[in-house]
Image: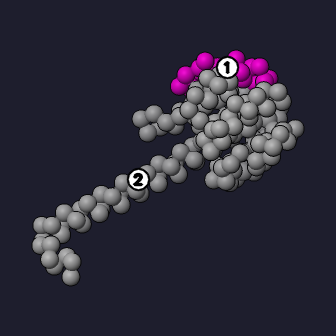
Amino acid sequence: MFLKKLGKFSTLCLVIMCGLILASSASHAYASSFDVKLKSKYLAVFNNYLGRENGKICIINSPEIFKLVNGLGKNRGFKVATSKFINGETKSCGYAFITSKNRGEAKRLIDLGRKNNIVTVSDIEGFTEMGGGIEFFEEDGRVKFILNVKELRDVGANPTSDLIGIAADTI
């Protein structure tokens, strides 16, 4: 009934606008899913380029990334844990992925990681400047990362020249 009152041109415009809105939502969902998969893959291979004996990754507050990294870990022989790190239970972590959901606790978690020789990784803007080890960011639709080389070395990681070479930036 509503469409009959609009006329053909107005109906066509309405359909095109709805299509654009749906397409935009779908592409955003795809990009988010892609970002999660790419971050998970980076986390899964960082140990190969950081020379750490303990490759166990503790994932804080991200069930999506935990699920993907855990699947990759089973295939590649490393272990993944969930958010025990946030409560200070760090003994088994070699790496800690701190999501942007934990922005308010980032500095405390970085200090906890530093105290326990744990490589901290996050997608929080400014994470490496706060003292974190590795920061993910998005630029031109691509996931990239920054390395805080001094922090990585201070916690016992030795970033290879290959990893430093593919980093978007180092501090």
In magenta stretch: residue 166: yes
Quadrant that contains the C terminus: top right
Instruction: Give the structural element (helix, strand or loop) at label 2.
Output: helix
Instruction: Tell me where residue 27 appears, x and y as whole percent.
Output: 41, 53
Question: Would residue 1 be seen by someone viewing this image from the given angle?
Answer: yes
Examine the image and state in which quarter residue 78 appears. top right
Residue depicted at x 40% and y 56%: 25
In magenta stretch: residue 9: no
| Residue located beneath label 2 in the image | 27
Q: For marks 2 and 1, give the CA distance.
A: 35 Å
Mark 2 Cα-neighbour bin, 10 Å: few <14, some 14–19, many ≥20: few
Residue depicted at x 57% and y 43%: 38
Instruction: Tell me where residue 14 appears, x and y as whole percent.
Output: 22, 65
> Residue 38 vs residue 155: left or right?
left
Residue type, label 1: Val
Find residue 149 and name its label. Answer: 1
Residue depicted at x 21% and y 82%: 1
Question: Would residue 76 be seen by someone viewing this image from the given angle?
Answer: no
Q: Which residues are magenta?
A: 149-171
Give the vertical position of 138 relative to 166 (above or below): below
| Coloring scheme used | one colour
Instruction: Tell me where residue 44 appears, x and y as whole percent.
Output: 68, 41
Residue 79 or 134: which is nearer the viewer? Answer: 134
Instruction: Tell me where residue 96 appears, x and y as whole percent.
Output: 73, 38
